[in-house]
């Protein structure tokens, strides 16, 4: 049960950090390009890579599973799910599984764009007439 609370706490911290940072950057770099989101996604990828390395089997003393869950699932997951996507893609590439890595990247981007479009269509269709 403790692990779920730690993940929830990490997720809350990550989400609030994402909102604050993305908004702060968006205000500074006003314009149509989503600089704040790009920054959050890139820094989230750096963080999950760092946390994966320092909590992985390459270190002499592994931290508790709860620490890894708090940092990677909670904090990074709340901050950006792009970090998990990137770590999983890197794992496929390290295994030499280029076809699956490419399929995962293309499939994720294309299917998520289609998903957003379908969700928008559904939301528009369900909206009350004005």
Image (cartoon, helix red, strand yellow):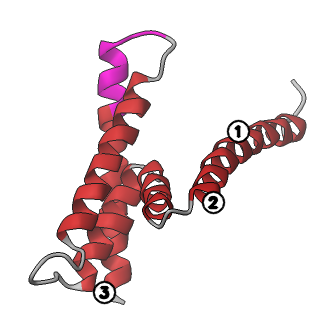
Q: Nearer the viewer, mark 2 or mark 1?
A: 2
Residue 23 higher or lower than 11, as above or below:
above
Q: Is residue 127 left or right of residue 53?
A: right
Q: Real-space Cα distance between discs 2 and 1?
A: 19 Å
Asked whether 28 falls inside the magenta stretch, the response is yes
Q: Is residue 43 left or right of residue 94?
A: left
| Residue drawn at point x = 9 percent, y = 82 percent | 60
Which of 121/71 is in front? 71
Residue carrying label 1: 113
Residue 64 higher or lower than 125, as above or below:
below
Which of 42/66 is in front? 42
Which residues, given as a range, are shown in magenta? Answer: 22-31
**Disc 3 and disc 1 in contact, CB within 8 angstroms:** no
Characterize the magenta stretch by its predominant secondary structure. helix
Asked whether 73 falls inside the magenta stretch, the response is no
- The answer to which quarter of the image holds residue 35 is top left
Residue 109 x %, y %: 64, 42
Mark 2 or 1 closer to N-term?
Answer: 2
Mark 3 or 1 closer to N-term?
Answer: 3
Q: Is residue 40 left or right of residue 113?
A: left
Residue 65 x %, y %: 27, 84
Residue carrying label 2: 100
Q: Nearer the viewer, mark 3 or mark 2?
A: 2
- Number of disc labels: 3
Which of 44/105 is in front? 105
| Residue drawn at point x = 37 percent, y = 90 percent | 1
Q: Real-space Cα distance between discs 3 and 1?
A: 35 Å
Residue 2 badge: 3
Q: Real-space Cα distance between discs 3 and 2?
A: 35 Å
| Residue drawn at point x = 73 percent, y = 47 percent | 111
Residue 52 x %, y %: 28, 66
Label 1 neighbourhood size at 10 Å, few (<14), some (14-19), many (20+)?
few
């Amino acid at each position: 049960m403790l692990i779920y609370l730690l993940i929830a706490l990490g997720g809350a911290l990550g989400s609030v950090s994402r909102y604050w940072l993305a908004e702060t950057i968006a205000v500074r770099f006003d314009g149509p390009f989503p600089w704040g989101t790009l920054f959050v996604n890139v820094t989230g990828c750096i963080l999950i890579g760092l946390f994966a390395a320092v909590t992985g089997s390459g270190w002499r003393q592994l931290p508790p599973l709860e620490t890894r869950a708090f940092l990677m699932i909670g904090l990074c997951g709340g901050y950006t799910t792009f970090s998990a996507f990137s770590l999983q893609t890197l794992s496929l590439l390290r295994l030499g599984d280029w076809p699956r890595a490419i399929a995962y990247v293309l499939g994720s981007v294309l299917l998520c764009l289609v998903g957003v479009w379908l969700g928008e269509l559904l939301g528009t269709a369900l909206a009350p007439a004005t």
